[in-house]
Image: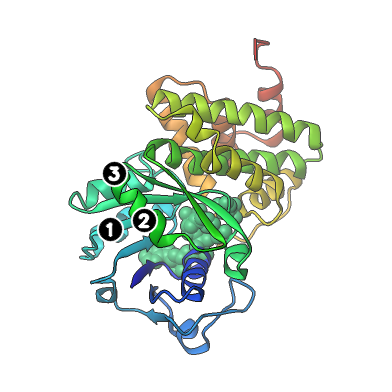
């Protein structure tokens, strides 16, 4: 039995993917009445829940599961862990971002809140809709305890959901968090009509920034070059299906954006910009995105600030 906390797009997609393979899955969410009744997910374009998925509003349903996958928006994780007495022995963070209060990633936050639990992170290039449709996807499973990581890799892999393993939790957390910030910038560039060449430049310099911060925080460069970093950067910066890219596109084009949509890169830009200042690490793209989303600079000033940086070696 596998538990999934969070019946939004990603939690539901994971439940569908695992349920389709015959796993018994319990999917918990706050307002799951309509989903429980219809067994169809509107967020995933009408995908039907397999019979092996039980939808529940009772957190006690997570007891006695082999692992609980936590697919909540990043900024909701700390409050959820504080406010619930869920005591799962194995927790897998499925969110991407940096917590604004503690400036830590989701797995680190969970390890601190549940010190006795085995904690892992599932991250990498994957749109929920693709996973729910059963399209092939490869993800990173990060767990500091390699034996537990191997167990989870076997438990959660399916013929179309291929998990690669690492013990570098910090690197995997930062890749997934930072690619959303760079995707907002990439969307802004395209929305403002600056062209594909400018996007490629921004992605490359953004990647350099991701690696710089990750190395300073003790992560491995090869983790950033993998699915959780480079892989997800390519997906998220290159697709209008991404909410972070689309949000940036709206910023660049000056068009409205639905404020109820989960855009992890906004809060994460603020958190990472603070982290950069605290650690004395130069993060120009992140600082620009944080200033832009908070309205501290306008678009033309943001573009100017990136184009007028001192010339230097690559
Ligand atoms: N959607 C994707 O394609 C995708 C893919 C990979 C990773 N992720 C990650 O998964 C995480 C969740 O994203 P999503 O796409 O499922 O978002 P979503 O907006 O579709 O769903 C979020 C769900 O969390 C619930 N929620 C919000 N605050 C809560 C709280 N305090 N307590 C309980 N429930 C709460 C909402 O009701 C909603 O059901 C994000 O960190 C995202 O980066 C998403
Ligand atoms: O829609 P986004 O921008 O939240 O991206 C979804 C996933 O993180 C892509 O890997």
The residue that disc 2 covers is: 152
Which residue appears at 39% of the width and 37% of the height? 168
In the rendered image, the residue lying farthest to the bottom is 37
Q: Is residue 294 visible?
A: no
Number of marks in picture: 3
Compute the Cα span from label 2 to label 3.
Answer: 11 Å
Which residue appears at 23% of the width and 51% of the height? 113
The residue that disc 3 covers is: 145
Q: Is mark 2 within 8 Å of ligand 1?
A: no
- Quadrant for the N terminus, please: bottom left
SS of the residue under disc 1? strand
Residue 260 percent across, percent down from the top left: 55, 63
- Tell me whether circle 1 and circle 3 mark residues in contact (CB < 8 Å): no
Compute the Cα span from label 2 to label 1.
Answer: 9 Å
Q: Quadrant of residue 252?
A: top right
Q: Quick check: 123 left or right of 149?
A: right
- Tell me whether circle 2 and circle 1 mark residues in contact (CB < 8 Å): yes
Whichever of labels 1 and 3 marks the residue nearer the N terminus, that label is 1
The residue that disc 1 covers is: 90
Q: Is mark 1 within 8 Å of ligand 1?
A: no
Whichever of labels 2 and 1 marks the residue nearer the N terminus, that label is 1
């Amino acid at each position: 039995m596998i538990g999934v906390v969070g019946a939004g797009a990603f939690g539901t997609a994971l439940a569908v993917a695992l349920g389709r393979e015959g796993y018994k899955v319990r999917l918990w969410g706050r307002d799951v009445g309509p989903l429980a009744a219809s067994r169809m997910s509107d967020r995933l374009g009408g995908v039907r829940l397999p019979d092996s998925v039980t939808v529940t509003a009772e957190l006690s349903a997570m007891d006695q599961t082999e692992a609980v996958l936590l697919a909540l928006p990043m900024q909701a994780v700390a409050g959820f862990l504080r406010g619930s007495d869920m005591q799962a022995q194995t927790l897998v963070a499925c969110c991407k971002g940096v917590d604004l209060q503690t400036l830590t990633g989701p797995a680190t936050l969970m390890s601190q809140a549940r010190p006795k639990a085995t904690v892992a992170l599932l991250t990498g290039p994957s749109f929920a809709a693709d996973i729910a449709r059963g399209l092939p996807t490869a993800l990173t499973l990060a767990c500091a305890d390699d034996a537990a990581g191997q167990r989870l890799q076997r438990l959660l892999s399916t013929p179309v959901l291929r998990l690669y393993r690492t013990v570098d939790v910090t690197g995997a957390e930062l890749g997934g968090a930072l690619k959303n910030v760079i995707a907002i910038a990439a969307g802004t560039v395209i929305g403002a009509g600056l062209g594909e060449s400018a996007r490629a430049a921004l992605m490359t310099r953004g990647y350099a920034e991701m690696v710089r911060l990750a190395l300073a925080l003790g992560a491995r460069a090869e983790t950033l070059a993998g699915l959780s970093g480079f892989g997800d950067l390519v997906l998220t910066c290159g697709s209008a299906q991404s909410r972070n890219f689309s949000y940036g596109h709206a910023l660049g084009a000056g068009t409205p954006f639905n404020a109820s949509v989960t855009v992890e890169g906004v809060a994460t830009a603020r958190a990472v910009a603070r982290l950069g200042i605290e650690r004395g690490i130069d993060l120009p793209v992140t600082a620009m995105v944080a200033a832009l989303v908070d309205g501290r600079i306008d678009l033309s000033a943001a573009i100017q600030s990136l184009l007028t940086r001192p010339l230097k070696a690559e």
